[in-house]
């Protein structure tokens, strides 16, 4: 049986029978993905990575995106971030079409080792995007100090990334995104390469920053438990060529705790449901309308 909250608040997509995630009335969405399709041209022929994705994110939402390996999660995030052009459809930020990386957006990737500059100290890594954006020096310093404080790294501003643990390096990457003060933060499996304890700490840090700073977050993860623990909503993708398989509201209490929340019967119920859907997606199940 499906949990009660599933499909709650879902409104039909404007363009007809194609399965869609939750959409909002015009003017209410901060981020809109509309009929997004991405086909890669390769020497071996075209690869249709994403077939048709439609969903909205409202101001201040924290949504997780899960789907089978190869279902196009990174492709979608790159299209949203303006790093990759769509074949069809569009991404709108505050109603404006995204055609290049928008100033209001920041991305945290999985590979912190590659996203931080090893020759720059922690504080300089965090400061760099602010410099590039022309933020005045005094304000830059304050924002860097605040961001390092927020991620619990106020005591290592002069260290180099390679002098820190993996979890600490990822916190530097998060601090860099936070200092930039984005309206939308995209996170692509950001904790996949850290140990379980650090991962739990970083999950709690993400929710705390989300609450304190009021950002809108789209968080891609392979980890079903993580998606349910972190998200206010979980968007499940089908296997490639990708459509939205289901868009679930996570009706767990706002204050989450690694032991208490994960021990709740409702957590288990939601987790089971997402797990089942991913298994179905892996077996090639697609929402009926996608086949039409
Ligand atoms: N640059 C590219 N050129 C050609 N095909 C690509 C490219 N990038 C991704 N693809 C293909 O597009 C599909 C979706 O890939 P993508 O990396 O977006 O999926 P994913 O859900 O993020 O995967 P994973 O969960 O394994 O990280 C795959 O079939 C992949 O092989």
Image (tube, grey):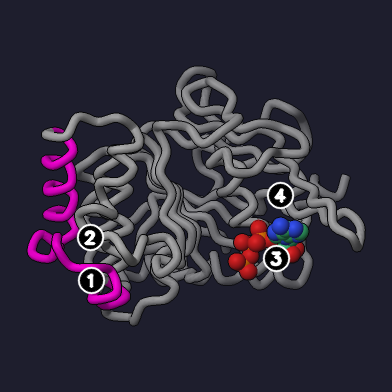
Give the residues in magenta: 139-167
- Mark 1–mark 2 distance (CA, rounded to whole Å): 34 Å
Give the residue at mark 2. 122
**First-in-chain label (4 vs 2):** 2
Structural crowding at the residue carrying mark 1, measured as other residues with C-alpha within 10 Å and reported as few (<14), some (14–19) or many (≥20)? few
Residues under numbered marks 3 and 4 in contact, where contact means CB atoms less than 8 Å apart: no
The residue positioned farthest toward the front in the image shown: 119
User: Disc 3 on helix, strand or loop?
Assistant: helix
Q: Which residue is mark 4?
A: 243
Whether residues under marks 3 and 2 lie with C-beta atoms below 8 angstroms apart, the answer is no
Disc sitting over residue 260 in the figure: 1
Q: Which residue: 24% across, 53% down?
A: 124
- Of mark 3 and mark 2, the one earlier in the sequence is 2
Alpha-carbon distance for marks 4 and 1? 34 Å
Which of disc 4 and disc 3 is earlier in sequence?
A: 4
Q: Label 2: how many residues lie within 10 Å, few (<14), some (14-19) or many (20+)?
A: many
Q: Look at the numbered discs 1 and 2 and tell me whether their residues touch, using CB distance below 8 Å.
A: no
Q: CA distance from mark 3 to mark 4?
A: 10 Å
Mark with earlier residue (1, 2): 2
Q: Which residue is mark 3?
A: 281
Mark 1 or mark 4, which is nearer the start of the sequence? 4
């Amino acid at each position: 049986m499906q949990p009660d909250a599933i499909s709650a608040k879902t409104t039909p997509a404007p363009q007809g029978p194609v399965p869609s995630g939750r959409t909002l009335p015009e003017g209410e969405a901060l981020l809109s993905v509309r009929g997004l399709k991405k086909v890669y041209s390769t020497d071996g022929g075209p690869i249709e990575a994403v077939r048709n994705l439609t969903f909205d994110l409202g101001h201040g939402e924290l949504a997780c995106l899960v789907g089978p390996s190869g279902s196009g999660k990174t492709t979608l995030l790159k299209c949203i971030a303006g790093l990759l052009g769509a074949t069809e459809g569009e991404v709108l930020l505050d109603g404006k079409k995204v055609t290049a990386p928008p100033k209001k957006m920041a991305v945290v990737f999985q590979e912190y080792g590659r996203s931080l500059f090893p020759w720059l100290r922690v504080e300089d890594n965090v400061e760099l995007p602010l410099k590039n954006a022309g933020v005045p020096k005094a304000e830059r310093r304050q924002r860097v100090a605040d961001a390092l404080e927020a991620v619990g790294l106020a005591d290592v501003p002069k260290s180099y990334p390679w002098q820190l643990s993996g979890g600490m390096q990822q916190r530097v990457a998060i601090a860099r995104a936070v200092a930039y003060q984005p309206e939308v933060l995209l996170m692509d499996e950001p904790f996949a390469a850290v140990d379980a304890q650090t991962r739990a700490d970083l999950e709690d840090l993400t929710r705390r920053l989300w609450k304190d700073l009021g950002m809108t977050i789209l968080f891609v993860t392979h980890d079903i438990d993580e998606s349910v623990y972190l998200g206010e909503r979980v968007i499940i993708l089908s296997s490639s060529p990708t459509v939205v398989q289901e868009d679930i509201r996570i009706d767990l209490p706002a204050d989450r705790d690694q032991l208490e929340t994960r021990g709740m019967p409702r957590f288990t119920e939601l987790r089971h449901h997402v797990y089942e859907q991913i298994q179905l997606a892996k077996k090639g199940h697609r929402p009926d309308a996608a086949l039409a």
